[in-house]
Amino acid sequence: MRAVVVSQPGGLDALQVTTVPRPEPQPGWVRIKVKAFGVNESEVTTRKGESDPEVTYPRIPGIEGVGVVDQADEDSGLRPGQQVATMMGGMGRSFDGSYAQYVTVPTGQVIPFETSLPWGVVGALPEMFQTAYGSLTRGLDLKAGQTLLIRGGTSTVGLSAATIAKDLGATVLSTTRSPDRAGELRAVGVDHPLVDNGTIADQVRELMPDGVDAVLELVGCSVLADTFRTVRRHGTVCFTGALAGQWTIPDFTPFMIPNGVRLTSYAGGATDLPAQVFRQQLQAIAAGRLKAPVAKVYHGLEQVRDAQADVEAGTTPGKHVVLLDD
């Protein structure tokens, strides 16, 4: 089969399209014929050699993918030709991932579905929706009628979280660093776009004097103290990402957390996106109730370099998806 292999860390030229043996699924694993996959910042990190020691080389990157079952154990409940999604769980990091014509993964991280949506749309969803949905449910336990602040709103997870939160019945505030991108937030249903210049607490409190019920923190520790100031007493902040690059707080003390404000985190996997929920999200997209924030669709493994370059540039909002044409 053909695949993109990173033999050793480097620049975009480290992404080499080559021919490798088609993987054989071990017991309890499934082989998937890949139809499309999203390109993520973590895969850029893997290519550069900046990931944690879990990542070894040579490696086929790709932490998510969609396609059809090619081979599975008889007792897996999966059948050849069935549409499936997969993500995370060491995929593209400790074992080879989705930048290939075929990928093998543990059965437990396979989500079956049925949809007539294009593969270029479905390929944008697994990791993006899993992270957003898991953060809002397991992390924040968001309910209808509550107020949610998304800090880092024009990221793929931020855009997805806005659509899901609106579908849940929440009022959504969301941030962007650029005033020109406020329209992108409104387009996915955000009620109150906010321009983030490093401090947003005063803006939030003007809209919600008592503070918001919940915050999805995607920018990171560099703004966390300010984020705390946006939350009502007994509200919750869920730390899910660090787009600004700062994952730790020097000399952290729990007393920096305001009285009564709760801090949690989210870093889940495929099992946090139940098949029924994923199917509902696909149906909602088909019906036009949810939006799939797709930035661009690329065709063929030869365009993976272009996709990663665009992800690094960060100039186009939404998910970058590589479609493998038969």
Image (spheres, grey):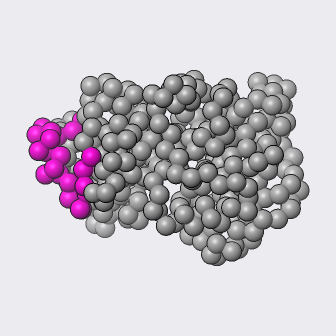
Foreground pick, 275 / 285: 285
Q: Where is residue 170 in the image (x, y as percent from the top left)?
A: 31, 30
Q: Which residue is drawn at 20% across and 43% down?
A: 231
Tally of marks: 0
User: Where on the picture, by quarter, is residue 62?
Assistant: bottom right
Q: Does the magenta stretch include residue 160?
A: no
Foreground pick, 111 / 261: 111
Q: Where is residue 149 in the image (x, y as percent from the top left)?
A: 28, 43
Q: Is residue 210 magenta?
A: yes
Q: In this view, does 48 lie to the left or right of 221?
A: right
Foreground pick, 255 / 78: 78
Q: What stretch is highlighted in magenta?
A: 193-213
Q: Is residue 304 left or right of residue 276?
A: right
Could one spot residue 73 in this view of the protein?
yes
Q: Look at the picture and state if 283 lies above or below 57.
A: above
Q: Is residue 21 left or right of residue 144?
A: right
The quadrant in which the N terminus is found is: bottom right
Q: Residue at x 58, y 34 (%)?
A: 271
Q: Look at the picture and state if 21 lies above or below 81.
A: below
Could one spot residue 268 in this view of the protein?
no
Q: Which residue is drawn at 59% across and 63% down?
A: 308
Q: Where is residue 104 in the image (x, y as percent from the top left)?
A: 77, 45
Q: Position of residue 27 (x, y in %)?
A: 83, 38
Q: Which residue is drawn at 51% across and 39% down?
A: 292
Q: Look at the picture and state if 276 lies above or below 262.
A: above
Foreground pick, 195 / 49: 195
